[in-house]
């Protein structure tokens, strides 16, 4: 099986917000309740050892380490500095990043993380009215002002990785996109809410995405990258993808929880309790053991993991049945089309038509 190339470290299991769509706290799996709030030095040093073994065994030139949560900055500046230092001492090939809600990102935290080469992404769902509908404190207060402050601190900084935005079809897509542009992100990740066949998404996702694509694609100059659209364009042109939202490329990711448990990608927690579990941990098992876990093998098996109805679809190699968690059906497992199947088909067909028209126009020029 392919080696893992990305490791998500749950450096802090708790969060200072209560976003209503959060797959960690608000959906099916509640295993976070039984884990320590923060990853201890004993756990992160053992994780570093396991990652180092994996890198050496597979001859990897680099791996990505994502500091995650919960809210990772709750771990505190000093702990994060120690953690990154300890991992880099064992895994010099590691590239570090973190995804934060921005509430705790101040100048001292930014300087410390940037000084260690950690790239920082911030979650923002659009202008204040939209963002604060979903991304709130537990007492109902919105968090937009905090995310906005963090992004203004990051603007133009070499550590700025971009913005993660969760799609809400009820909003004005172009207004949301243009509000994100105000923060000059080098990249935008558009995240589809984690729905499945037992919890259907709101309608209108394709219309929303197509409106943003057209605004982005037709701009006289490229204003930012949008990972989902760039991945689809790459696939349309015969390339590959590195995203778990589209395509058939292996998703070589392992999650290490705050107690040292090794899990599959934690978006699976949106489906049912224990969906991400492997029964492995960094104290008793190496990471190669995780590559042999049936759930991870299934996610790496490309065409072999697709339902018959997917294989009969003309864009199955581009769509790849979408995000693995979005295929789940109660009582029917994961060998199903994505619950966003119709939306993905419309988006892929639309992008394919736009790209084909551009290629034809250039050929005639």
Image: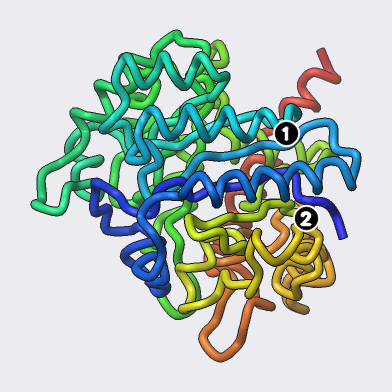
Label 1, label 2: how far apart the Cα atoms are: 28 Å
Which quadrant holds residue 177?
A: top left
- Tell me what residue is drawn at x 39 percent, y 50 percent: 38
Residue denoted by label 2: 248
* Quadrant (top left, top right, bottom left, bottom right) of the N terminus: bottom right
Please, is residue 69 above or below residue 80 in the view? below
Determine whether label 1 and label 2 are within 8 Å by CB: no
Q: Secondary structure at mark 2?
A: loop
Residue 335 drawn at (x, y percent): 69, 78
Q: Is residue 191 visible?
A: yes
Q: Is residue 213 visible?
A: no
Few, some or many C-alpha atoms within 10 Å of disc 2 (few <14, some 14-19, many ≥20)?
many
In the rendering, which numbered label is found on residue 114? Answer: none
Residue 193 drawn at (x, y percent): 42, 57
Q: Secondary structure at mark 1?
A: loop
* Quadrant (top left, top right, bottom left, bottom right) of the C terminus: top right
Please, is residue 323 above or below residue 163 in the view? below
- Tell me what residue is drawn at x 57 percent, y 63 percent: 261
Please, is residue 45 above or below residue 124 in the view? below
Left or right of 241? Residue 328 is left
Of residue 361 and residue 230, the one placed in the foreground of this image is: 230
Total count of labels: 2
Q: Residue furthest front?
A: 42
Please, is residue 268 above or below residue 22 in the view? below
- Tell me what residue is drawn at x 51 percent, y 44 percent: 41
Residue 110 drawn at (x, y percent): 39, 18
Residue denoted by label 1: 91
First of labels 1, 2 by sequence position: 1
Of residue 75 and residue 130, the one placed in the foreground of this image is: 75
- Tell me what residue is drawn at x 64 percent, y 77 percent: 334
């Amino acid at each position: 099986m392919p080696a893992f190339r990305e490791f998500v470290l749950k450096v802090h299991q708790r969060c200072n917000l209560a976003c209503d769509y959060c797959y960690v706290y608000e959906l099916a799996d509640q295993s976070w309740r039984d884990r320590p709030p923060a990853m201890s030095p004993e756990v992160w040093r053992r994780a570093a050892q396991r990652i180092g073994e994996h890198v050496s065994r597979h001859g990897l030139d680099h791996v990505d380490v994502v500091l995650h949560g919960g809210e990772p900055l709750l771990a505190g500046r000093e702990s994060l500095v120690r953690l990154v230092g300890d991992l880099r001492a064992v895994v010099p090939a590691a590239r570090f990043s973190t995804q934060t809600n921005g509430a705790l990102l101040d100048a001292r935290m930014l300087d410390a993380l940037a000084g260690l080469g950690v790239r920082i992404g911030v979650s923002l769902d659009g202008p204040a009215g939209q963002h604060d509908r979903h991304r709130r404190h537990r007492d109902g207060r919105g968090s937009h002002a905090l995310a906005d402050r963090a992004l203004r601190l990051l603007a133009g900084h070499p550590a700025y990785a971009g913005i993660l935005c969760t799609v809400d079809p009820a909003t004005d897509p172009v207004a949301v996109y243009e509000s994100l542009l105000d923060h000059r992100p080098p990249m935008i990740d558009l995240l589809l809410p984690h729905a499945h066949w037992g919890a259907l998404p709101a309608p209108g996702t394709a219309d929303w995405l197509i409106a943003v694509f057209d605004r982005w694609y037709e701009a006289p100059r490229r204003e930012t990258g949008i990972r989902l659209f760039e991945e689809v364009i790459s696939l349309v042109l015969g390339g590959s993808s590195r995203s778990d939202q589209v395509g058939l490329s292996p998703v070589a990711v392992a999650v290490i929880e705050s107690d040292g448990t090794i899990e599959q990608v934690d978006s699976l927690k949106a489906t049912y309790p224990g969906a991400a579990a492997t029964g492995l941990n960094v104290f008793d098992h190496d990471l190669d053991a995780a590559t042999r876990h049936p759930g991870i093998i299934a996610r790496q098996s490309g065409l072999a993991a697709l339902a018959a109805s997917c294989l009969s679809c003309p864009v199955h190699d581009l769509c790849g049945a979408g995000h693995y968690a979005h295929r789940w059906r109660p009582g029917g497992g994961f060998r199903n089309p994505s619950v966003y199947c119709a939306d993905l088909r419309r988006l892929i067909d639309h992008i394919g038509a736009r790209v084909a028209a551009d290629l034809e126009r250039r050929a005639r020029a």
